[in-house]
Amino acid sequence: MIKFLSDEWIKALCQELNQSEAYAQAAKNWEGDFYFIVEPEGEIKEPVIFYVDLWHGKCREAKLVADEKEKEPAFRMSAPLSAWRKVIEKELDPIQGLMTRKLKLEGNMAMIMRNVKAAQELVNCCTHIPTEFPSE
Amino acid sequence: MWFFASPEIVFGEDALSYLSEIEGKRALIVTDDTMVRLGFADRVISHLQEAGIEVQVFAEVEPDPSLETVKRGAQAALAYEPDWIVGLGGGSPMDAAKAIWVLYERPDMEPEEISPIETLGLRQKARLITIPTTSGTGAEATWAIVLTDTEGQRKLVLGSRENVADIAIVDPIFVAELPPQLTADTGMDTLTHAVEGYTCTWHNDFSDNLCLKAIKLIFEYLPRAYEKGDLEAREKMHNAATIAGLGFGNASAALAHSLGHALGAVFHVSHGRAVGLFLPYTIEFSARGSGTRYAEIARFLGLPPSPLEGGQPPSTGARGSEEEEAESLVSAIRGLLKRLGQPSTIAELGISPEEFETEMTKLVENAENDPCTVTSPRIPSTEEFERLFRYAFEGKSVDF
């Protein structure tokens, strides 16, 4: 099992993405890096920030970031742990999460809506990681 | 958490006269030249003038309105400064009106930025009235805006819950003379909305019964509206379109829309004809995952427990398996398509195999990335999308 809020987890996701032919195909036109931000909630006192650089169906870089100012990604998606867990466990469709603002997005939503298949494959890759979630 | 949004709906004979009671100073009617030529715009103008409202008409909306058209409409609105925007026509003028309204209120935005995650802050300058003149799109009651990116040859599904009209006027007078072909095309659009609204993954307790009621009205009245064109049937279909709009607008659509949007953007097939054509194929595909919701529709309609063979009626109270009942629904829809003289294959649309094959990559890519795909009960792989298109081209029942 890999602890969710760790550098190891986001690197495991990067590896999954780079091994996934479905993701490579679906995201072949995608250009844009992300911050996935886990907001403070319960035991989590500080935001946890994952940086992922996604480029034409591949993950070029992924790491846990200590300082939000370290990168200037095109997209920032943030939510509390409970919402991220639901997305990763496929209980919450990320597009529905965005519409109900359970997930907050800064960036070009139109670009996301043009690449829904890539978003879906990205979530599929998350589900392949044996994840240990912290208590909420 | 989810939402149910609806305009105030004024419906039935003489509903249009409600416009004489509204308060305001200036209205911009967003429509097309056909509405002007048929005198429909004049009817609306007359009622608005009775209410003491000045009117300007922007009649430049084309079928499948482009991003450029709505930008021009927004410029017209910014110059005229209306406090009402009135979308008059089929889905294209009403969708254009929604987008023009947003860009008028938010000139800092690009049309492509209109999304559910943005707080638009509408209703600072104007409110929106929608008046459908076809019985199909349900755009009068939904928040979605479908625009066409002409350069990229794809349809963009945009919108925000704030886009829902303040008032929808559903007056059957506008469809009293609707030509049979348009009655059939738009009627199949309504049926697809209702079936997909009921079966998509975002279906919910508030939208379910609206979808079922619309489906029942369509099977009962669409053939009559098409064959006889009597006013009662037309009024029922007009109501069904808005009811289905409320139903799927507060849930979502599904695969027939993904495939229909893709085909329509590349080959310029009318929206209703395209989604209606795909509906039986996508039900066959989706029901192989789970037929429950389709079986429920079949039971609600009182369809035979399995497709009739040799014209034998079912025994009273008999029930089939979920898959058989879903097949029964498919059979009823194919029967309706036939009765309405609608094409049941892509080939019947006059698209040659060569043209079709040339565009296959684009069709699949568009369909895969259509937002309606995400809310489909069974999501096809790339290969399955391609097979769905090919089966629909040839008219083969889906067996995968």
Image: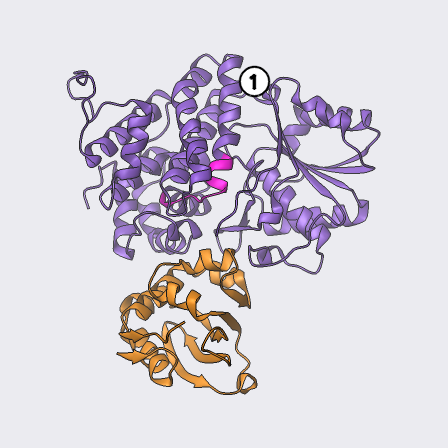
Crowdedness near tag 1: few (<14), some (14–19) or many (≥20) residues, C-alpha within 10 Å? few
Instruction: Out of B65 and B374, give the one closest to the viewer.
Output: B374
Seen in the image, is A5 located left or right of residue A130? right
What is the display colour for chain A? orange
Seen in the image, is B120 located left or right of residue B281? right
Residue A29 seen in render = no
- Residue B249 part of the magenta-drawn span: yes
Instruction: Out of B300 and A53, give the one closest to the viewer.
Output: B300
Tag 1's secondary structure?
A: loop
Query: Looking at the image, what colour scheme do you see?
Result: by chain
Q: What is the x, y in percent for residue B239? A: 52, 25
Instruction: In the rendered view, tell whether residue B188 sits above or below residue A9.
Output: above
Q: Which chain hosts label 1?
A: B
- Residue B113 part of the magenta-drawn span: no
For the residue marked with disc 1, what is the amino acid?
Glu
Residue A104 seen in render = yes
Q: Which residue is mark 1?
A: B177
Instruction: In the rendered view, tell whether residue B364 sits above or below residue A13.
Output: above
Q: What is the x, y in percent for residue B320? A: 18, 29
Quadrant in which residue B217 is drawn: top left
What is the display colour for chain B? purple
How many numbered markers are drawn? 1
Instruction: Out of B202 and B265, give the one closest to the viewer.
Output: B202
Quadrant in which residue A118 is drawn: bottom left
Q: What is the x, y in percent for residue B155? A: 49, 49
Q: Residue at x 78, y 42 (%)?
A: B82
Q: Residue at x 50, y 63 (%)?
A: A111
User: Magenta residues, as a range?
Assistant: B245-255
Q: What is the x, y in percent for residue B263? A: 40, 44
